[in-house]
Image (cartoon, helix red, strand yellow):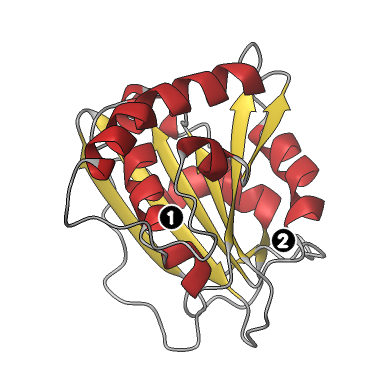
Amino acid sequence: NTTAQSPWVFQPAGARDPRSVEASLGSSMASRLGPRRRPPEALSGRSPFRRVARPRASLLAAVLVWQQPSQSSAKDALVFLGATGDNALRPSGVWQGIYEAFAGGDFDRVGGVDIHVAMNTPHTPEELHTKVQASLAGLYVELQGNSGWQCQTEAGDCSPARFMQDVSVNIWPGRDANAQAANMAPSLQEYSRITLYLSIPPAIFGRW
C-alpha cells in the first residue's frame, strides 16, 4: 500500500490503508469501478467518498467525489476524462450539462469550480476549446432566446468563451494513467473538493 502525500486519497469504507490518487486513477480503480461491477450499496458515514457508475449511450461514466473532512473556502475542482468523446460533446451531453450548471449560478454558489481536463496526445488544448465551444454555441443562442432564462453567474457573463476560461488541460504523452495523475496532483492541492468524472468507452475503462 502507498502512503499518500497527495490530497487525493481513495479509501473505501472499512479499509485501513488509504490508496493514493495515482492508484485510484490507475489500474486499481478498474477493480473497484469495473464496467461489470455494481457500485457498493452504501458507504460508511466516516467515508468521504461517493461513487456512481452508470452506462449511457454505449459509454460508461463513473463519478468519484473526494472531500476533505474540514471544509475551507477553496474552490471545487472537476477533473474530466473523455472530454472530446461523443457523449461529452453531443446535444444534452456532459459539456452542455456542466455549462448549464455554470450558467445557472451553481459554480458561484460553491465558491467557484475549475475544470481540469485530462487528455492524451495527439489531442491539443486548441482542439478541446474549438469542439466544446462549437457544442455550446447553439445552446447559448437557444437559451438567450428563451424568455424564461436568465444568466445567473455573479459576473453576469454566461458566454461559452467565459465558461472556457475556467477550463485547464493536461496533455500527457501516452496512456500511463498513474503518471498523468501524479503529474496533475500538485495543481489540485488547493481545492477542498475534487470530483472526477469518467466518460470513456467500456473497452478502455479498465486501463484507468
Q: Position of residue 127 (x, y in %)?
A: 57, 16
- Please name the residue that numbered disc 1 is placed on: 102
* Residue depicted at 46% across the width and 27% down the height: 133
Q: Quadrant of residue 179?
A: top right
Left or right: residue 89 versus residue 191 is: left
Q: Position of residue 180 (x, y in %)?
A: 71, 36
* Residue depicted at 32% across the width and 46% down the height: 97
* Residue depicted at 51% across the width and 68% down the height: 108
- Badge 2 amino acid: Asn
Position of 190 relative to 25 (above/below)? below
Please identify the residue farthest to the top as the structure is shown: 122
Q: Which mark is residue 1?
A: 2
Q: Quadrant of residue 145?
A: top left
Q: Position of residue 34 (x, y in %)?
A: 37, 43
* N-terminal label among 1 and 2: 2
Residue closest to the eye, 111 or 27? 111
